[in-house]
Each structure stands twice: as structure tokens, then as C-alpha cells.
Image (tube, rainbow, N blue to C red):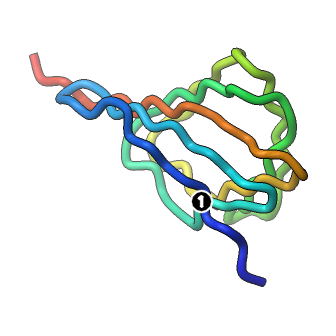
Amino acid sequence: MQRPQAVPTVQIDNEFVTVTEWRFPPGGETGWHRHGMNYVVVPQTTGPLLLETPDGPVTSQLTAGVSYYRSIGVEHNVINPGEAEFIFVEVEIKQASH
């Protein structure tokens, strides 16, 4: 089954962070990917997201404004199972050298 693609809009990309707004149409997905950086997600919408993971599907309940952190290496496909658009902002943290 072909799903619509989530739409990423890069808002900031500098030596420290990449900030991307993700907009998921109903049934939309990111496609399988592996995170190459630590990251923070800031949900703009409240509701469930379906995560296809190497260990099987997981449903994650997100709440608008309640951020969470994940470490480098997470691998998944993120899907909006709902009937309304879902939005979050992802902040990828680049390793700064001192």
C-alpha cells in the first residue's frame, strides 16, 4: 500500500542544529530512516503516531508542546494513523567541537 509522504520543511540548518517541521497528511509517512544525530521532537499536535520499528509496530501518544529526546541510531518509519494532519518539529543536535 502506497502512503502519502510527510512533508519536511527545514527551518534552521547551521553548525549546531537542524530544525525541521514535519507535516503528516492523514495516513502520511516519513519512510524508513535511521537517525544520524541525537534529536528532540516538539509535537505541535496531540494524538497517536504509529512507529514501524525493527522490533515491530509501536504506537506513541504525543501531546502538543510536550517534547521528548531520542539518541542517535533510532531506526523507524513514522506514520500518522489519524484522519487529520499531524505536525511536529524535530531538532537534530549536531556535535560541536570545542
Which residue lies under the disc numbered 1? 30
Report the front residue among 91 and 38. Answer: 91
From the top left corner, tell me how far across and down residue 85 is, in percent. 76, 45
In the rendered image, the vertical position of residue 1 relative to residue 13, given as above or below: below
x and y, in percent, of residue 43 in the image: 68, 27
Taking the spot 55% from the left edge, 49% from the top edge, the residue there is 74
Q: Which amino acid, by three-letter code, is at mark 1? A: Thr
Q: From the viewer's perspective, is residue 50 above or below residue 88? A: below
Q: Position of residue 51 (x, y in %)?
A: 74, 54
**What percent of the width, then of the height, locates residue 79?**
74, 57
Q: Residue furthest left?
A: 98
Q: Quadrant of residue 92?
A: top left
Q: Residue furthest bottom?
A: 1
The vertical placement of 11 against 77, above or below, is above
| Residue at image point 86% right, 55% down | 81
Which residue is more in the foreground, 75 or 45?
45
Front-lying residue, 37 or 80: 80
Q: Quadrant of the C terminus?
A: top left
- Left or right: where 83 falls relative to 86: right
Q: Is residue 9 left or right of residue 40?
A: left
Q: Is residue 92 left or right of residue 3?
A: left
How many marks do you count on the picture? 1
